[in-house]
Amino acid sequence: MIDLIMAAGYGPDGRDYPQNTVSAIAHSAGFPGCTRVFLSQDPRAFGQPQDSGQSGIYIVSARDPANLEILSFADVPAGHTTTCINDCKYLWTGGPMKDKDQPADWAGRPVFVTDIRNPKKPQVYKNPVDLGRNDGVTDYAHDVQVDEAGIAWVSGRGGLRGYWTKGRHWDPVARAHRVATASDPIPYAGGKFIQQPDVGFPGGSFAHNALRPTRSLGGHEAGDLALVTIENFSTSCETDGNLLIVSLGDSRDGQGWRSTPENPYRLDIVGEFSPWGQEGTNPRTGCSAHYFEMKGDLVVQSFYGNGTRLIDVSDPAHPEQVGYYRPDGGSGSSKWVDLRSHRPSHLIGLALVAVSLPGCADAARQSPPEAPSSSQAGSAVSENPSVATTDVADDAAPQTATDRTRGSRGGDDKQAATRSTACGSTVDSAGGESTKYCGPGQALIEAREGTSTILGAECIRRGDFVIAHFGTNYRELDQAATDYVGLVVGGVTEESAGAPSHFAAEVIVGKKRWALSDAEPVVELESGEFLARFTVGTPPDAVQINVSCELN
């Protein structure tokens, strides 16, 4: 549910730029339909001194990108970057160098954990994580990326270390099986490595950010390699920070957590890439590596003064430049002014991209309806003979239809059906935005006025979470021409049929909206099919919802 990661810098020219990092745009299960932006404030923001400035996290509602709303600010003892952990229930915030009131034996700020399950009242844990990262010394934890296996990788001075943040796993440091949490993670793998020659400050061990592909790369065992950028500004382009490819090798036994200057443990560097000597390089404008993205075997890597490089890493030992884009312009008086590339060029600019349910503001203000009693539970979809549906050929995308029997209105049965012919996202002539879902699935709605069926769905499984849409999702409630159901359900496994661990829903029936997160649904998985039933509203106006769809 994280759609985009972006960063913004602060100015070296003395102006009061906030040093902020927008680390994630995420769907908040507590308020269906809301997008959240998490903005970390570096202690150097607004001209404050690094060793005493205020740092923390802003939680911002971006439901309407033109009118951002600050929901809360949490005072956190770190603030250079922040990242969603465990489906955005928590944030991990790290960096920069230490505060004057922090322990004397720290060289930088570790990771501090914030519980954001209530985005208006975030709770900061007192005890940080990722301590002793630099040969036993607690140092600057710069950034966090979560891989496809759910492992959180912390980059910083002292290298790269990965952690389990949920589930039961072997702890190679404690030498025992235990349950990982966001505030008490379990070491997985990682350690220190040093780019050679090791020159400048903070030297070749400052890992800026990283990515661990969980698939095989270049014949190496799946998950054994990690791509890491070294942020380092030396006196020469030749010795500035590179993109490194390191082997996690045998580091899964906790060696990186036991490493000391006297008995150091180091990861092997398999390959590296620098713009030095490459086509399109200006060696006078700074060559340190920064953020990157990866798709397949292609890495899109930004370098501060040398733009964006397209790098083929199919042979990890010999990364090869296959293209580049270096923006020219600016005053040229400093390698820091106008020329530096913080992000790969295809991400440059402030663009908030999120797929979400509409109605965030309404959801935040409404009190959730009462949970249904067990006596209100309805029958399964297949057991209700009164459902009217639209026949769809086996090889065609199903249409979305809403067919209601209004027997209680005026005594005459009247059917109303609205069908849209275009699947996907559209904007009508009046500017109304909607997304129609046309995959296999349906939602049966049983209300006092009668029954209706929504045909067409999109159901996506991400780990033990299911995100499901049924019908057509309209951006604004007054534009809704058909009914709609949207769900976010957590803790969904084949072995855990019944009540899920997390649940949020938005239901629109006849232009009436319910948004809730405290219902008592019953869910199950069966041969790749997702089934759920729950109730919204209170008697006598309660509405029973039964949904089924194929998972992608």
Image: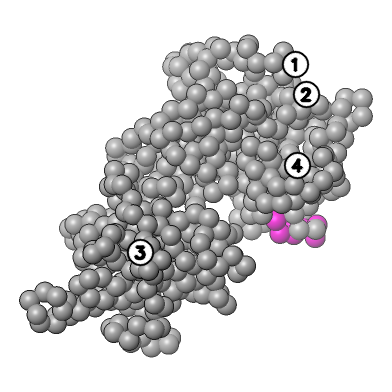
- Secondary structure type for disc 4: strand
Which residue lies under the disc numbered 4?
187
Mark 1 to mark 2: distance in Å? 7 Å
Is tag 2's residue or tag 4's residue first in the polypeptide sequence?
2
Q: Are marks 3 and 2 in contact (CB under 8 Å)?
A: no
Percent position (x, y) of residue 94? 61, 29
Q: Is residue 31 left or right of residue 409?
A: right
Number of on-image labels: 4
* Other residues around mark 4 within 10 Å, as few (<14) / some (14–19) / many (≥20): many
Residue type, mark 3 in image: Thr
Judged by its main secondary structure, the magenta piece is: loop
* Magenta-drawn segment: 214-220
Kind of element beneath mark 2 = loop
Q: Is residue 530 left or right of residue 496?
A: left
Amino acid tagged 4: Pro
- Mark closest to the chain's N terminus, 1 or 2: 1
Q: Is residue 8 magenta?
A: no
Whole-number angstrom distance, CA of label 1 to CA of label 3: 55 Å
- In percent of width and height, residue 437 lies at 37, 69
Whichever of labels 1 and 3 marks the residue nearer the N terminus, that label is: 1
Q: Which image quadrant for residue 395? A: bottom left
Whole-number angstrom distance, CA of label 2 to CA of label 4: 16 Å
Q: Determine which of the numbered discs, if any, sits on residue 105 in the image.
A: 1
Residue 137: image tag: 2
Residue 281 picture quarter: top right
Q: Residue 486, can we see it?
A: no
For residue 535, the mark is 3
Q: Is residue 499 above or below residue 208?
A: below
Q: Residue at x 85, y 33 (%)?
A: 258
Residue visible at 29% across and 66% down in the picture: 543
**Which residue corresponds to the image point at 86% horizontal and 47% vertical from the top-left?**
250
